[in-house]
Amino acid sequence: MNMLNEVKSGLIVSCQALSHEPLHSSYIMGRMAAAAKEGGAQGIRANSKEDIIEIKKTVDLPVIGIVKRDYDDSKVFITATMKEIDELAESGCEMVALDATDRVRPNGETLETFVQKIRAAYPELLLMADTSTIEEAKKAEELGFDCVSTTLMGYTEKSEGHNIADNDFERLKTILKEVSVPVIAEGHVDTPEKAKRCLELGVHAVVVGSAITRPQLIAEKFATAMQEAHN
C-alpha cells in the first residue's frame, strides 16, 4: 500500500535527536517510535539511515526518512544531495523528505535537477517537499513531488516570523487551495487542538515532533512558565 494511503488523516510523529541532544541514539529513537505507535501514530519521520533501520526493527509503521547534514556552500541541510538519497534508499523508508525551498543548494544544483536525478535512480521512492512559502509549495507540485509539507515555514529568511498557525492557519489554507497534491502540516503544530484544526481544514496528515519527542523542550516550557510565577 502507498504510504500516503496508510497515513491519511493520521498523526506522523517525528522521532529525531541530533548529536548534541540528550536522546541522541538509534536505540532510543526506536523506543520513541514504539511509544508513538502505542499512542496512536500512523507514521514516523526520522533522521539518518541508522535511526530508520532501528525504527524499522521496532515498529511496522511507514517512515518518512531524512538526513540532516551541513554543507559549507549552502543553508540547505535536509536531504541535500544524492549522498543522502542513497543512504535513505538503503534504509528501507517508504518516503523521503527533502528541502524544497528556493535557497541555493550544495554545488549550486537546482531543485529541478536534483528531483530528476532522484526519479531516475529511484523511481518508486515517494518524495515529500519540505517548503517554507506558498510559492515553494506550488513549485514543488510542478516538479512532481508526491506531497508537500510546511516543515520549513518560519525557518528560512523568506518565511521568517511566519507560522502556519497564524490567523487560524491562513497560509496553510492558501496552500491547500493552490496545490492539488496531498498537503502535510508540519512545524509549529504543538498542541492537539492545532493538529485537529489542520485536519478540519483538509490536510492529508499532520507531523508533530518536538511537542512529543523532545523532552528537554517540553520541560523548558514548564520551567519557564513556573519561573515567571516567581518574578
Image (cartoon, rainbow, N blue to C red):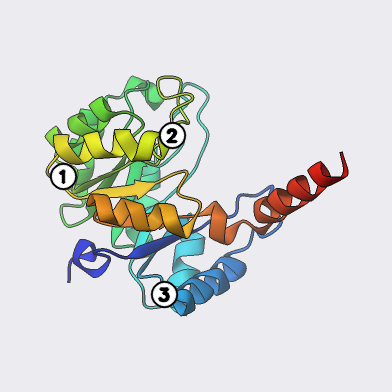
**Place of residue 172 in the rendered image (x, y in percent of width and height, measured from the top left):** 29, 39
Q: Are marks 1 and 3 in contact (CB under 8 Å)?
A: no
The residues bearing labels 1 and 3 have C-alpha atoms spaced at a distance of 35 Å
Please name the residue shown 31% across and 33% down the image: 171
The residue drawn where x is 50% and y is 51% is 190
Tag 3: amino acid: Gly
Indicate the quadrant where residue 163 lies.
top left
Foreground: disc 1 or disc 2: 2
Q: CA distance from mark 3 to mark 2?
A: 26 Å
Residue 14 lies left or right of residue 60; in this view the side is right
Residue under circle 1?
Answer: 120
Q: Earlier in the sequence, mark 3 or mark 2?
A: 3
Q: Earlier in the sequence, mark 1 or mark 3?
A: 3
Instruction: Provide residue 12's location: percent of width, then percent of height.
Output: 38, 62
Residue type at numbered disc 2: Asn
Q: Circle 3 — which element?
A: loop
- Element type where label 2 sits in the image: loop
Observer able to see residue 69: yes
Q: Is residue 8 left or right of residue 18?
A: left
Q: Residue 92: which quarter of the image? A: bottom left
**Residue 178 image-quadrant placement:** top left
Q: Measure how far apart labels 1 and 2 are at the Cα level.
A: 35 Å
Q: Identify the residue under disc 2.
A: 163
Mark 3, residue position: 40
At 69% from the left and 49% from the top, the residue drawn is 221
Q: Which mark is residue 156?
A: none
Are circles 3 and 2 on residues that touch, CB within 8 Å?
no
Whether residue 81 is visible to the viewer of this picture, yes or no, is no
Viewport quadrant of the N terminus: bottom left
